[in-house]
Amino acid sequence: MTQQSSAHVCPRCGETGDGRFCGGCGAALNEIHCGACGDPAPGGARYCRGCGTGLASRSNTAPAAAVTAPSPRRETPIAWVYGGAALLALAAFVSGNVAGRRSPAPAADQAPLTADAGQVPLQAGASAAPDISAMSPEERATRLFNRVMLYTEQGKADSAKFFAPMAISAYEMMPADAHNQYDIGVISAAVGDVARARAESDTILAARPTHLLGLVLAIKAAVLGKNQADVTRYGARLVAAAPSERAGGLKEYAEHSRDIDDALAKASRQ
């Protein structure tokens, strides 16, 4: 004997049916239960009256679990902190290398010097001092001579004494002519070596008694040695020899014309 189902009124369209679903609209005709809280809900209901959960199924079966989008992931600040610190450290390292690698404007005692002996340095910031080891003996000697003279003018006696032996060694690698002997004597006088200055002047004057640079150097040595008699004697010889000697046009006279002029002026006053 077949059991007949009781009739139900469709909650959606109002038609009567005796199955589980409405023949007119397909809505569920029997009562369903909330899958979240278990409360009953009439067929066709979309949300649970007890907890508000969406009713995915219109049947007695529990609704499928709702698929929810994952909540946005919050990046932990630690990663950013470490990343930022690493970038800062890298920037500091590069900047230090650059700084460290970045050269400053040359100081007065480190500025490149002119080629004229005893002259002032070139304009500050022009260029860095070149490597003297790559120069010829003459270029090296001139460069070192200028440096010793600059330190002497600035009152930096220790620095002048440090470079003086190098300068003299450079001159000793060249021919022993009056010009080079004079420069060695001037360097020696600049650092207080009176004996070497006098020896160089004697050597020059032994070969040529009227050589102006030999006489100028002899006066320098006499001044350092506080020998006023020699200062006067060599001064008189310088004044007497100057006209004819300068007429010869020696190269060293032109290059050291200021030294000769200064010595002549002082000798003339005496």
Image (cartoon, rainbow, N blue to C red):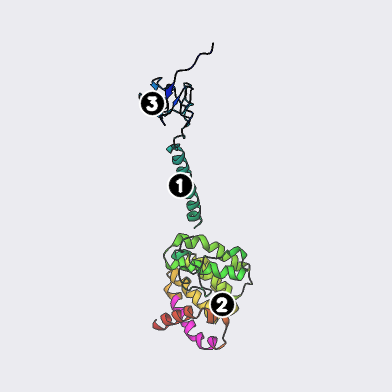
Determine the residue positioned at 54% across, 66% down. 144
Q: Which residue is mark 3?
A: 48
Front position in the image: 119 or 89: 89
Q: Are marks 1 and 2 in contact (CB under 8 Å)?
A: no
Rate crowding at label 3 as few (under 14), some (14 to 19) or many (20 or more) other CA atoms within 10 Å: many
Q: Quadrant of residue 30?
A: top left
Q: Which residue is mark 2?
A: 205
The residue most toward the top is 1
Residue type beneath disc 3: Cys
Spot occupied by residue 236 in the image (x, y as percentages of width and height): 46, 82
Front position in the image: 123 or 4: 4
Spot occupied by residue 250 in the image (x, y as percentages of width and height): 57, 83
Front position in the image: 199 or 38: 38
Q: Which mark is residue 5?
A: none
Q: Quadrant of residue 269?
A: bottom left
Residue type beneath disc 1: Leu
Q: Main secondary structure of the magenta part?
A: helix
Residue type beneath disc 2: Leu
N-term mark: 1 or 2 = 1
